[in-house]
Amino acid sequence: MHKKRILRLLAALLICFPGYSSTQALITEKNWVNHPKIVEIRIIYNEIEDAIKEKRLTKKTKTHEYEGPYVKPTLKAVFFDEANAVMKYIEENGSDDSALRFSYYYDTKKACGLFLSKAER
């Protein structure tokens, strides 16, 4: 479980910082908790989640009928800020016994993180 979390965070870094310089400190198992790039992603995540809780973002959803295992998302949700910029995008796939939720977080219109979790049904 711990290694999966590290891999998700590293994937988020690759999306957010594709030109990451090799002269900067590498992210390792020992420094990933306090690495500046990880801390930056956590700040973005917390800002977006706080804005959702405080109802400062507009949410639009679209649902689809279940068509089979992972054929098409059964739920799509988008959270917009006051300038209509996408801040978070969610897709849910699967059925009651095997559902996944993909959450994408954005900072100034670029993806900054992908978080995969079991969808609550």
Image (spheres, grey):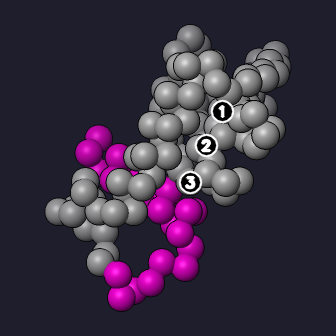
Q: Which mark is residue 112?
A: 3
In the image, taking residue 2 as reference, residue 20 lies left or right, namely right
Label 1 CA crowd tier, 10 Å (few <14, some 14–19, many 20+): some
- The disc labelled 2 sits on which kind of residue? Tyr
For image coordinates 50% across by 56% down, the residue present is 12
Decide: is 119 above or below 38: above
Decide: is 119 above or below 88: above
Q: Position of residue 34 (x, y in %)?
A: 25, 57
Decide: is 119 above or below 3: above
For image coordinates 29% across by 41% down, the residue present is 1
**Answer yes or no: do the residues labelled 1 and 2 have beta carbons within 8 Å?**
yes
Q: Which mark is residue 104?
A: 2
- The disc labelled 1 sits on which kind of residue? Ile
**Answer yes or no: do the residues labelled 2 and 3 have beta carbons within 8 Å?**
no
For image coordinates 47% across by 62% down, the residue present is 13
In the image, taking residue 14 as reference, residue 88 lies left or right, namely right
Label 3 CA crowd tier, 10 Å (few <14, some 14–19, many 20+): many
* Mark 2 or 3, nearer chain start: 2
Q: Position of residue 41 (x, y in %)?
A: 45, 52
Marks 2 and 3, how far apart at CA: 7 Å
- Check disc 2 and report its element: helix, strand or loop: strand
Q: Dot 1 corresponds to which residue? A: 90
Read off the magenta span. Answer: 1-24
Q: Position of residue 19 (x, y in %)?
A: 55, 79
* Mark 1 or 3, nearer chain start: 1
- Check disc 1 and report its element: helix, strand or loop: strand
* Mark 1 or 2, nearer chain start: 1
- Check disc 3 and report its element: helix, strand or loop: strand
